[in-house]
Amino acid sequence: MANNRPPPKTYICNLCLFQFKDESGLRKHKKRKNKCISEDHPFVQKKLEEHKEEIERLRAQNEQVQAEKDKAVEHANKLLNMNDKITGMDRTVNVIKEMVIENNLAAAVAAPTYNLTQNNNNDNKSLNFNIQLAPKEKERLDHIPTAQMLHILNQKDFARSVADLVQAVSFNPKAPENMTWCINDKKSENGALEYNSELNIITRDDSSDVITRNLQSILFPVTDILKEIVIVTKAKINKQQNRNYTLYFNLLGATDIKKEYINIIKERAFDKRGLCKALWEHLQIGLETKKINFKSIIFD
């Protein structure tokens, strides 16, 4: 393989032509008490003439080294600029992907009533059904395969496992019925938006309360599924999956959710707010600007 490295830079006194290994040596030489004789001295002129070709070669070599150094710096700057552009493109692609998902979802729910026509004994029968947002503890879970559930159980970080579960259930375009809440503002205390099935509106509420409420809502049916996977089907689970399996059951019914769980779920719910808001808009569900006191609502 050819060696493309530039030749080493040389440091030569222009008076006595002494060559040094580095720049500091040449600098000290020039600052010494006994200075070199002048370049105009006949002896120096004679030596310069004798080594004229060598001096020119070394000067050309130094110029080449400097030129290659400048070229390398320019190339490095181009790579840095390219990396910045790639990073920016990655962000743009992620935004576009999210927009595509939202637009596809919006197209799917633009007309929430679907008509299916069956031909039975030459009689046409129309079957109508609407996409309806799922009430608490009635979330749809059939879109999550067993393999995905086991993958969620296999996360080493339980907080991430919980966040993956919430995202798979509540923010999955395959199950728009479950998109009943999101985090619209991470900094605001009442930054959560949530569907109120009693009033058929989107209400604002405390983010931690909404996260806790909806996490507990999906834990009831999810733990039943986990129990079926582990006990009924006797799926082979490893130590990590068994540990998280136990933690999910310990989490069931808890009202004081760890802050690390709340924070990571909040990030996921904030990232997916566009999906939920697109769905609500096309279902023509209005937004109540005032916070609703859920404790004052009497449920049947």
Image (spheres, helix red, strand yellow):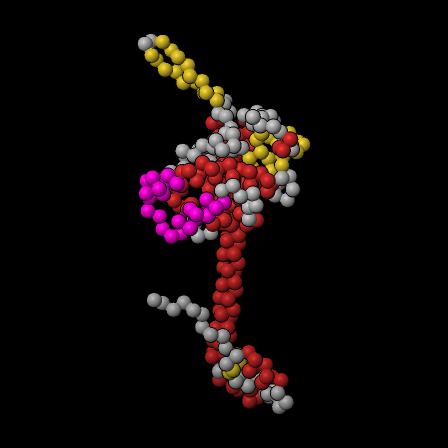
Residue 249 % position (x, y): 46, 44
Q: Where does the magenta region start and end?
A: 227-251
- The tally of labels here is 0
- Residue in the image at 47% along x and 32% along y: 139
Q: Nearer the viewer, residue 165 or 232?
A: 232
Check residue 233 for magenta coloring.
yes
Q: Could you tell me which quadrant the N terminus lies in?
A: bottom left
Identify the residue at the far right of this view. Answer: 290
Residue pushed farthest top?
122
**Image position of 194 (left or right of 247):** right
When the figure is inspected, residue 217 is found, relative to residue 198, above or below; the finding is: below
Relative height, residue 58 to residue 70 (above, below): below
Q: Is residue 277 magenta?
A: no
Q: Nearer the viewer, residue 83 or 61?
A: 83
Q: Is residue 142 above or below residue 116?
A: below
**Residue at point 54% right, 25% down?**
283
Residue 277 percent coordinates (x, y): 56, 32
